[in-house]
Image (cartoon, rainbow, N blue to C red):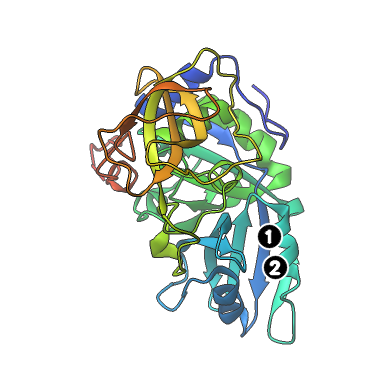
Amino acid sequence: MALADFARIDDFGDAAEEARACRIDCALFDFSFLECARVKGTGARRAIETFTGRSLAAMDVGKIYYALRVNSAGAVTADLTVWRTDEDSYDIMSGRHADIVDLLRLSNSGVEVADVTGNLAVLALQGPRAFEALSRLGDIDRIGRLNYFSFSEAELNGTVCRVGRLGYTGEAGFEIILPRAAARDCWQILSRQARPAGFIAADMLRIEAGFVLFDNEFRLPVSPQEAGLGRFHRSADLGRPPITLISFCADADALRLPWRPSRDLHRPAAPGEIVVTSACRSNAAGRILGLGYVRADAEWGAGLHDPTRTFHNIQRTPLPFYDTAKRRPRVAWRYHDHSQKQI
């Protein structure tokens, strides 16, 4: 199949099978909608710490940090990843163009910021056989030894790429940052090893893994703590009573995918009310699975109701629903080469 050409594709024919392939084998996603700013200079670290509200003091070259944007009212507006590429150089990846624009405003005598989005493409290879599939494009033993949220360079199909061990599915896998001119050839080769998958499958997988999507979970003004992200940013809760993000199973008469919540969301007023922010038809759950906010004092076994009446028979489930111990993306790769050497 052809590369998605940097436009979002919802599916490649069967979203459920694309998600299943990611869980049992591996799947290939085009995440080239992500934008990237390169921040360099002696003041780069301080500027990024101010921008994200997260300390980079312990961040080594070759590491990736998850970070948040929080507005003046204390509400989360976006999440992003910070890649430390050199002593005074960082790449910041975001799904929002507004973040890149804001970063460009940080340029001063000690900080140089450039929008490098136009030069890059981002492919994601996810699933238990992702390393095996990637190994067919080059010598990547160093990549196989990466820890979670670390990256290194590798030559894939003759092109030098940056490969990070992270993803958005709850499976072990990689994000591959490569020159945009080489992306189509790389996609075509990888798509012979891994099933191409679209946004609906990615949405299903990330909901199962309990990962937020900025355009969903941050539509409702919430603090980092309320979104379950308090360890990435220290800030106060926005209101009382406090609310919390939960996972749930439910039924619905109709659900168009990918599902999006209304722009007009309000904090849940009663303990039994849920404000739904994400929903999908989940292979793992066997029914509709979603994320939403309830009051923090809502009891686990109490019934929940959706004021929009889209969802019914709502039952709270563990968050994350899939891989509740949060170990799968971190486990060591297991593969065999011709000498039966195991890594």
Residue 85 vs 66, above or below: the answer is below
* Label 2 sits on residue: 103
Circle count: 2
* Residue 204 in view in this figure: yes
- At 55% from the left edge and 14% from the top edge, which residue is drawn? 254
Task: Specify the label residue 15 is tagged with.
Answer: none
Residue 100, horizontal then vertical, whole percent:
71, 61
Q: Residue at x 46, y 65 (%)?
A: 62
In the image, is 266 to the left or to the right of 166? right
What secondary structure is marked by label 1? helix
The reply, left or right, for residue 7 in relation to residue 251 is: right
Q: Position of residue 18 (x, y in %)?
A: 49, 22
Q: Which residue is mark 1?
A: 99
Q: Residue furthest front?
A: 270
Hey, what amino acid is under mark 1? Answer: Asp
Please determine whether, in this image, residue 298 is positioned above or below residue 255: below
Mark 2 touches mark 1? (CB < 8 Å) = yes
192 lies left or right of 262: left
Q: Residue at x 35, y 22 (%)?
A: 285
Q: Nearer the viewer, residue 224 or 155?
A: 224
* Secondary structure type for disc 2: helix
- Image quadrant where one finds the C terminus: top left
The kind of residue tagged 2 is: Leu
Q: Residue 259 is drawn in which quadrant?
A: top right
Quadrant of residue 80 in the image? Answer: bottom right
Q: Assess disc 2: are there few (<14), some (14-19) or many (≥20) residues with their C-alpha within 10 Å of its C-alpha.
A: many
Camera-side residue of 204 and 254: 254
